[in-house]
Image (cartoon, rainbow, N blue to C red):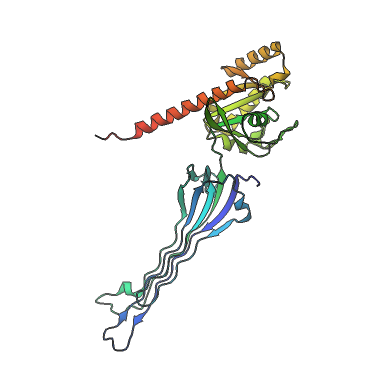
Amino acid sequence: MKFLDLAKVYIRSGSGGNGCVSFRREKYIEYGGPDGGDGGRGGDVVVEAVQGLNTLIDFRYQQHFFAQNGRPGEGRARTGASGEDIILRVPVGTEIIDEDEETILADLTEVGQRVILAKGGNGGFGNLHFKSATNQAPRSANPGLGGIERTIWLRLKLIADAGLLGKPNAGKSTFLAATSNARPKIADYPFTTLVPNLGVVGVDGTEFVVADIPGLIEGASEGRGLGDMFLGHVERCAVLLHLVDGSGGDPVGDYQTIIEELEAYGGDLAEKPRVTVLNKIDTLDEEEREFIKEELESVTDGPVLLMSGVSTEGVTEVLRALREKIDDRNAAELAADQEEEPWRP
């Protein structure tokens, strides 16, 4: 299945049915009169987050979604049938964005969340609705209200606890493959990873989800390489794992390049908790390890862990550091929820 995280769709809710002009005329019945029923209501366009989906690929082959119109009213005071709703089923983590590509209409982060994107039009009143003492034979009825047409964007942001950052060939996919059952493509050339991957990793009896995204290069925010669009998949993460290639020629420059791209991306991504790791230490001797580690710590203002995804040296310590940051985020969210709850006697 191909991965698709951005789709443009066109939606239209159903129009309401017209009201009916009708009069009751039956043999042997003394009193007649208006009996035109109201039109039915048009269907809504609804988006729902469902389980089991992890891509928006379905919206590549169908971009137009129209709800059913309401049926017109009928005689004998019969109301027309309402139009059926149309439901767009999307993966959890999907954002609904307006046509301007900036205004966020909804953010579906839980299974079962539903949002009405376009409400159906109301049905028109039949002539029975206009009957009065001074107008006992009304010959007019209301037309149904038209549906709403709009264009929206669907953007998928994967929901993961930790996100991997680094330049191409920093060892992100190797780390994911070594710590989970995920099998991302691994090769010795840049941009091996072309689409995000998710993996469930475990340490000390607990599990959490890690997201691997394509590598960033200098100028990614300006569209170079694969760009920085994939950074949206790590916006929801509690912690970012920044892998620096120890076998590269300029580890400090590689680190600063990623930080600059995070700041250029905007939002609070650059302020998220990070765990910085010097990767591929199996290619370095003890003296080189310590030298590069000290150089990185001088620019990170924090500890730098050592790891090799190939030999798995230091992997457990890295996972524990990630788990600690995730636990801190969960504890903070729990405390915030408890403060918001009103006191009850």
Image quadrant in which you'd find residue 34: bottom left
Task: Name the residue rendered at 66%, 20% in the picture.
Answer: 252
In the picture as drawn, the residue positioned furthest to the top comes out as 287
The outermost residue toward the bottom is: 28
- The residue at the point 55 percent across, 46 percent down is 52
**Residue 171 location, x and y as percent?**
68, 28
Q: Nearer the viewer, residue 323 or 18?
A: 323
Q: Quadrant of residue 199?
A: top right
**Residue 216 visible, this angle:** no
User: In the rendered image, which quarter contains the C terminus?
Assistant: top left
Position of 171 relative to 143 (above/below): above
Image coords of residue 106 (percent x, y): 48, 46
Q: Where 289 falls versus 344 (above or below)?
A: above
* Residue 31 in view in this figure: yes
Pinpoint residue 156: horizontal percent, then vertical percent.
56, 43
Q: Residue furthest front?
A: 205
Residue at the image position 72 percent from the left and 16 percent from the top: 284
